[in-house]
């Protein structure tokens, strides 16, 4: 594979793209000013790439990337980062897994040593594997004590019937409990390779010197073999044919609703229109749903929307909680009235201009630090193309009243949605659940000791 380079000037940074012969994509964003450098490695693998028996392995592997490699033992990465006065972390999504460092510009190169080492020589010691699995399982169990999380997971599974996006990123207890360390080694071998990764360096660096340093640490790494084509198959969900409804009960007095509408792909014009729609509905105190349902009519204590676009599709979410003594049907009817207005009536020019200004301000804020820019670059490079990171606000500016209404009519129809309610348990049920939960918590605490 021949190396190649490309450059672009954006966001007060000169961005250079280079691909090493082993396939590693390198983005260097030279942005002088603050003596800080962000280093991120993005792997094009997330929970959607898992098979059923390994559900949750992407997130679990993210944990294990801090538990020892050929040169850096357990705890060494955090210790070195602290000694250098920096910060590090990682995160897993449906479509990608990313690792980041933020360090001063006179010591950032140490991050490259660490990332190059754990890209190909993770040790995955069985004892550490078992210990960290217990941590992940406890994290998963704690999530089952959160009514919003349980409700949204059930709604997502109903809205996405076949595609792997239906599974929670953290996975399932039974799959993780039975997952063998050799299965994780195989997953690591398949996806943690230079040709499946993007390295982003952003901040106070000299691009030529930075690229030379990257070559020194990464160019000798073997490319690795891409996964077999059969492993990239994705089931396709059919267009919804009617509203679905579900409910669960919880031992508190909250009355919560979660709605999900299958929506668009990441970094598209529809994605931008859905961002605008989300801001029209719940972007601040002047937004339609917050102003009318929370402030004016006092039907809800909270209400929010989220445009959750992903590489192979997405969901548009709405979350709300009833105010005291407000019946679920009353709140849902009021929400439906506002969504109908959005589908039927053009958004006034003044309101649309205000929302766009708010989104532009948010975009500017999101690019204040070198780590913010590195994250935006890496996400777009992994899930679409890095140049689209700097076109996002232009797509928002192009959204007009007609496109808002068209997108609302296509995606936000009642017959396309899943509606989930979480309602209070009956008193006898609540007492029984409280007793059971108390016993479970005591058992976990004793086990942790």
Image (cartoon, rainbow, N blue to C red):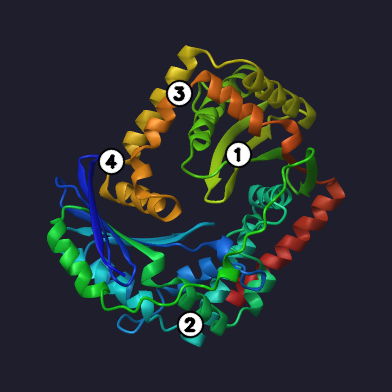
In the rendering, at what x and y percent does residue 130 appear? Answer: 55, 81
Viewer-closest of 139 and 237 = 237
In the rendering, at what x and y percent does residue 324 appear? Answer: 71, 30
Tell me the quadrant of the picture where the N terminus can be found.
bottom left
For marks 2 and 4 on the same chain, the one whose residue lies earlier in the sequence? 2
C-alpha distance separating marks 3 and 1:
18 Å
C-alpha distance separating marks 2 and 4:
38 Å
Picture quarter containing residue 282?
top right
Report whether 214 appears left or right of 171: left
Viewer-closest of 161 and 114 = 161
Residue 127 visible in rendering: yes
C-alpha distance separating marks 3 and 2:
49 Å
Report whether 423 appears left or right of 37: right
Q: Is residue 76 above or below residue 142?
A: below
Read off the residue under disc 1: 316
Q: Secondary structure at mark 4?
A: loop
Looking at the image, which residue is at 23% across and 59% down?
103
Viewer-closest of 98 and 106 = 98
- CA neighbours of label 4 inside 10 A, class few (<14), some (14 to 19), many (20+): few
Read off the residue under disc 2: 128
C-alpha distance separating marks 2 and 1:
38 Å
Read off the residue under disc 3: 355
Camera-near label (4 vs 1) is: 1
Looking at the image, which residue is at 85% across and 45% down?
426
Read off the residue under disc 4: 368
For marks 3 and 2 on the same chain, the one whose residue lies earlier in the sequence? 2
Q: Secondary structure at mark 3?
A: helix
In the rendering, at what x and y percent does residue 208 appear? Answer: 13, 60
C-alpha distance separating marks 4 and 1:
27 Å
Tell me the quadrant of the picture where the C terminus can be found.
bottom right
For marks 4 and 1 on the same chain, the one whose residue lies earlier in the sequence? 1
Looking at the image, which residue is at 38% across and 53% down?
381
């Amino acid at each position: 594979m021949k190396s190649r380079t490309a450059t672009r000037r954006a966001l007060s940074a000169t961005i250079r793209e280079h691909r090493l012969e082993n396939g590693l994509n390198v983005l260097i964003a030279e942005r002088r000013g603050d003596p800080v450098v962000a280093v991120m490695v993005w792997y094009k693998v997330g929970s959607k790439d898992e098979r059923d028996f390994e559900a949750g392995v992407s997130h679990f592997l993210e944990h294990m990337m801090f538990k020892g490699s050929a040169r850096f033992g357990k705890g060494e990465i955090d210790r070195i980062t602290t000694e250098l006065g920096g910060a590090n972390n990682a995160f897993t999504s449906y479509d990608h897994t990313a690792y980041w460092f933020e360090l001063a510009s006179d010591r950032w190169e140490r991050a490259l040593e660490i990332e190059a080492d754990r890209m190909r020589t993770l040790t995955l010691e069985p004892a550490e594997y078992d210990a960290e699995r217990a941590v992940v399982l406890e994290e998963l169990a704690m999530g089952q004590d959160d009514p919003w999380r349980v409700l949204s997971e059930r709604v997502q599974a109903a809205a996405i019937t076949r595609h792997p996006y239906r599974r929670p990123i953290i996975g399932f207890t039974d799959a993780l409990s039975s997952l063998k360390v050799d299965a994780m080694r195989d997953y690591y071998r398949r996806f943690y390779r230079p040709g499946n990764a993007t390295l982003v360096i952003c901040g106070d660096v000299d691009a030529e010197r930075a690229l030379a340093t990257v070559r020194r640490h990464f160019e000798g790494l073997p490319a690795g073999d891409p996964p077999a084509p059969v492993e990239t198959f994705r089931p396709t969900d059919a267009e919804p044919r009617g509203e679905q409804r579900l409910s669960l009960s919880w031992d508190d007095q909250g009355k919560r609703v979660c709605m999900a509408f299958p929506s668009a792909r990441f970094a598209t014009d529809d994605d931008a229109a859905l961002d605008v729609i989300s801001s029209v509905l719940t972007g601040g105190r002047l937004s339609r749903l917050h102003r009318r349902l929370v402030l004016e009519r006092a039907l809800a204590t909270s209400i929010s929307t989220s445009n959750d676009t992903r590489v192979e599709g997405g969901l548009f979410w709405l979350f709300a909680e009833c105010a005291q003594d407000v019946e679920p049907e009353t709140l849902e009817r009021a929400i439906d009235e506002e969504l109908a207005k959005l589908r039927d009536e053009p958004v006034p020019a003044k309101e649309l201009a205000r929302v766009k200004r708010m989104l532009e301000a948010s975009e500017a804020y999101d690019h204040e630090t070198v780590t913010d820019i590195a994250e935006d670059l890496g996400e777009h490079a992994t899930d679409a193309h890095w140049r689209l990171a700097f076109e996002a606000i232009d797509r928002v500016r192009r959204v007009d009243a007609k496109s808002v209404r068209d997108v609302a009519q296509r995606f936000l129809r009642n017959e396309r949605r899943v509606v989930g309610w979480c309602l209070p348990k009956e008193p006898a049920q609540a007492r029984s659940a409280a007793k059971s939960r108390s016993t479970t918590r005591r058992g976990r605490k004793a086990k942790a000791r």
